[in-house]
Amino acid sequence: MTLIPVERTTASRIGQVDFNNLDFGLHMSDHILVAEYSNGQWGAARIKPYGTMEFYPAMMALHYGQSVFEGMKAFRMENGDISVFRAATHLERFNRSLERMCMPTVPASLFLDGLFELIRTDQDWVSGNPGCSLYLRPFCFASEARLKIKVAEKYHFIILTSPAGPYYTKPYRLKVETEYTRTVEGGTGFAKCAGNYGSSYYPMQLAFQEGYDQVLWTDGKEHKYIDEVGMMNVMFMIDGVLTTPKLNTAILSGVTRDSVLTLAKDMGVRTEERRISVEEIETNLKQGRISEAFGTGTAAVVAPITTINISGTDHQIPEPTPSSFQSKVKNLLSDMRTGRAADIHGWNHIIQI
Ligand SMILES: *Cc1c(COP(=O)(O)O)cnc(C)c1O
């Protein structure tokens, strides 16, 4: 364990935050972790107060898009401990994303020790209110100032944290997207890079204008197979089988997706990961064989889907009830994270305070 120097703020902003009424991503906690990469290696990390930072306008991340992030959460447990959910899995994905973008990977000692020390520093920001958590945002970007088109040689690795409340989404009305693509096999869809978001906004905005909440992304080659929903993985309960698209290079490997699949098996629910065509979903919807559909992601955990528009026709899916799979799995996951249910998969990292 490396010792990380901590420069503490003299003006905590925690008093300005209403922990009973949190708007996602609006308030940043008091401190950040920063490390810089140059001359082929990562420098020492430090923790300092959150605030403005200076960069050159020629910073390469802004021009050529080398920018990658993670989204994860820390929870206040029933006994007062703080747990971080599946930290090592997030680190593995972060490094896969970095490799795809020709960026330097971040060693576990920097990422994990840095993250845990940062959470210790801002431990008062981890609320024990029901459904609350501390959202963790590790990210890396090319900070070298140069306009030449090349792989950057200087990077910043930063971790921000932000208190999050229960994230209730009203049931989604989806439009199947068959014109635009988020990404395509061979592209960057499996990497959590900033560009995937930038390119998704326009088709999402068109869907909003047509009265939908999100797009159901289809494969970029034929627009026949389902990839993801908005910025989440998607799951359907078809004839009692929890069915989700099989991972490929166009699909982000969600940690929530993996957790839900694992818990489904524990709960005795059959699961299938395979290609799912829009045509199959349409037929199954017409025959009433889809009892649930939902998105999965760290921010919302599960987000119910009740309408899917396929070539101009809205198809309905029942709203979840407390006995729906998605409600049960969401509660189980929450119980495991807060210590009300046994952490049988070893997903919690307990922070030593
Ligand atoms: C982050 C993300 C997800 C969800 O991943 P989790 O690890 O479950 O939070 C799904 N799809 C996309 C495109 C994402 O960026």
Image (cartoon, grey):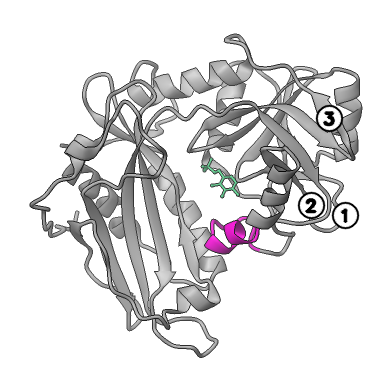
Q: Which mark is residue 219?
A: 2
In the rendered image, residue 246, in percent from the top left (x then y), is placed at 72, 42
Left/right of residue 234 with respect to residue 45 in the rendered view: right
Name the quarter where the N terminus is drawn. Answer: bottom left
In the rendered image, residue 211, in percent from the top left (x then y), is placed at 73, 37
- The alpha-carbon separation of the residues under discs 1 and 2 comes to 6 Å
Q: What range of the chain is rendered magenta?
A: 188-200
Q: Amino acid at mark 2?
A: Asp
Q: Quadrant of residue 249?
A: bottom right
Left/right of residue 277 with respect to residue 203 in the rendered view: right
- The residue at which mark 3 appears reads as 314
Q: Pointers 3 and 1 in contact (CB under 8 A)? A: no
Q: Amino acid at mark 1?
A: Glu
Q: Pointers 3 and 2 in contact (CB under 8 A)? A: no
- The alpha-carbon separation of the residues under discs 3 and 2 comes to 21 Å
Q: Quadrant of ligand 1?
A: top right
Q: Pointers 1 and 2 in contact (CB under 8 A)? A: yes
In the rendered image, residue 72, in percent from the top left (x then y), is placed at 42, 43
Report the front residue among 143 and 83.
143
Q: Residue at x 62, y 17 (%)?
A: 325
Q: Secondary structure at mark 3?
A: strand
Q: Secondary structure at mark 2?
A: loop
Which tag is nearer the camera, tag 3 or tag 2? 3
- The residue at which mark 1 appears reads as 222
